[in-house]
Image: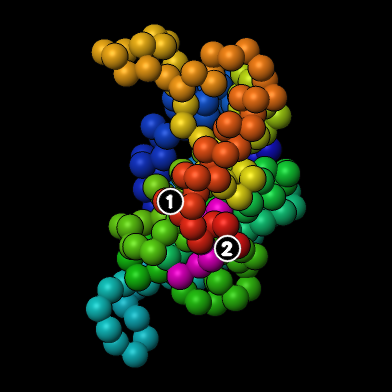
């Protein structure tokens, strides 16, 4: 999979993709993440990529021309399955969306800044919009990193144990059950006896019950969905 990210602050994306699982995914050749500095593709002086809003109002808007130039330049080399715009007014990102996107081959992500991007770019180039929550960030870079991480870890061969992702929270519409590791008795706090019974079927049933209980207590809306 290849993911191209359009940004005015590529430095913000250096660390998230240079460590841990995302680093290994790229080293294995399973994931390719490229950042493109929008300021390198603007026809305006001093790297200008934003301007005042028509009609007045506080806050600058990212101009359509630099974005159109870079988007079309990238599209010359490959066909993108999705052109995603990170925006707080987009549909909330979910595990289901991550699963769907992990099956794609080429994805482009546009990181907004200031008051956002010119609406004409959204109308003519963007095929999918994503929000990671009902709050506003300084820019779309951190949100883009969240999406790439959620997608990248699902690619076959990225995780050492590929079954691990199948039991993550939200994969089956519920939260994951509680987990424990050694020692079995820590400061007198003991793990549930069922985890030591050695019967995979019994343990699986217990975990399902715990997932259901935790979801009912913490995120009952998931069960309604």
Relative horizontal placement of residue 40, taking residue 82 as reference (left or right): left
Question: Local crowd at mark 2 within 10 Å, few (<14), some, or many (≥20)?
Answer: few
Q: Which comes before the other along the chain, label 2 or label 1?
A: 1
Q: Which residue is mark 1?
A: 217
**Residue 222: x %, y % from top left:** 54, 57
Point 39% across, 9% down: residue: 183
Q: Are marks 2 and 1 in contact (CB under 8 Å)?
A: no
Alpha carbons under labels 2 and 1: distance apart = 13 Å
Q: Secondary structure at mark 1?
A: helix
Point 51% across, 61% down: residue: 221
Q: Quadrant of residue 167?
A: top right
Q: Is residue 124 shown above or below 206?
A: below
Report the span colored magenta: 89-94
Between 146 and 205, the one lying in front of the other is 205
The quadrant in which the N terminus is found is top right
The quadrant in which the C terminus is found is bottom right
Residue 93 falls inside the magenta stretch: yes
Q: Is residue 102 shown above or below 41?
A: above
Residue 48, visible in the rendered structure = no
């Amino acid at each position: 999979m290849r993911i191209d990210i359009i940004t005015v602050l590529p430095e913000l994306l250096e660390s998230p993709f240079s460590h841990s699982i995302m680093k290994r995914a790229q080293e294995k050749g399973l994931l390719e993440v490229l950042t493109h500095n929008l300021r390198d593709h603007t026809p305006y002086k001093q790297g200008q990529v934003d301007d005042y809003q028509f009609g007045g109002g506080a806050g600058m808007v990212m101009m359509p021309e630099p974005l159109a130039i870079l988007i079309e330049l990238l599209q010359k080399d490959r066909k993108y399955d999705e052109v995603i715009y990170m925006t707080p007014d987009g549909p909330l990102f979910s595990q289901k969306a991550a699963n769907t996107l992990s099956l794609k081959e080429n994805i482009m992500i546009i990181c907004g800044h200031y008051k956002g991007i010119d609406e004409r770019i959204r109308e003519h180039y963007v095929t999918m919009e994503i929000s990671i929550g009902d709050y506003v960030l300084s820019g779309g870079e951190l949100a883009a990193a969240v999406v790439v991480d959620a997608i990248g870890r699902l690619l076959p061969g990225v995780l050492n144990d590929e079954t691990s992702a199948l039991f993550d929270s939200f994969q089956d519409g519920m939260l994951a059950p509680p987990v424990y590791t050694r020692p079995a008795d820590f400061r007198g706090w003991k793990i549930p006896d069922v985890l030591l019974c050695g019967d995979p079927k019994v343990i699986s049933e217990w975990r399902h019950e715990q997932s259901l209980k935790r979801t009912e207590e913490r995120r009952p809306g998931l069960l309604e969905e």
